[in-house]
Image: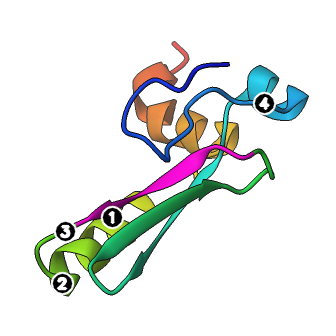
Amino acid sequence: MANRGPSGTTFAPRTLTCRVFGCRFRFAAAGRTLEWWCQRGCPSGGTKEYPTEEQAARLAAVLDREPRGPAAILAMLGGTLHRERR
């Protein structure tokens, strides 16, 4: 399977779980380098260099968040979906 994108980076999920549900990427900064990998164990991931350590750390903090579950999404929409009974 050919990689598309920068060398040393894989984008196509290679495990069945990631093909079905999508990769769950995690992000971390090591100095000026931002690293990402799939938490589910497939080999997708990569690295990127930033000009400063602060930029890499800030981006890792923003990107490394847990996805919202269905209950949280429904709670956000609750105000728009709820209708008063007449």
Upstream in sequence: badge 2 or badge 1 = 2
Q: Residue at x 68, y 19 (%)?
A: 1
Q: Badge 2 is on which residue? A: 54
Q: Is residue 76 above or below residue 67?
A: above
Task: Look at the image and say whether residue 48 sits in the magenta stretch.
Answer: yes
Separation of disc 2 and disc 1 at Cα?
Answer: 12 Å
Q: Position of residue 55 (x, y in %)?
A: 17, 74
Q: Is the magenta region chiefly helix, strand or loop?
A: strand
Q: Is residue 66 something that shows in the picture? A: no
Upstream in sequence: badge 2 or badge 4 = 4
Task: Tell whether label 2 touches label 3 (CB within 8 Å).
Answer: no
Which of the pair 18/69 is nearer the observer? Answer: 18
Q: Quadrant of residue 6?
A: top left
The span shown in magenta is 43-49
Upstream in sequence: badge 3 or badge 1 = 3
Mark 1 closeness class: few <14, some 14–19, many ≥20 residues within 10 Å: few
Q: Badge 4 is on which residue? A: 14
Q: Is residue 26 left or right of residue 19?
A: left
Q: Badge 3 is on which residue? A: 50
Q: Badge 1 is on which residue? A: 62
Q: Residue at x 88, y 27 (%)?
A: 16
Q: Is residue 50 above or below residue 69?
A: below
Mark 3 closeness class: few <14, some 14–19, many ≥20 residues within 10 Å: some
Upstream in sequence: badge 4 or badge 3 = 4
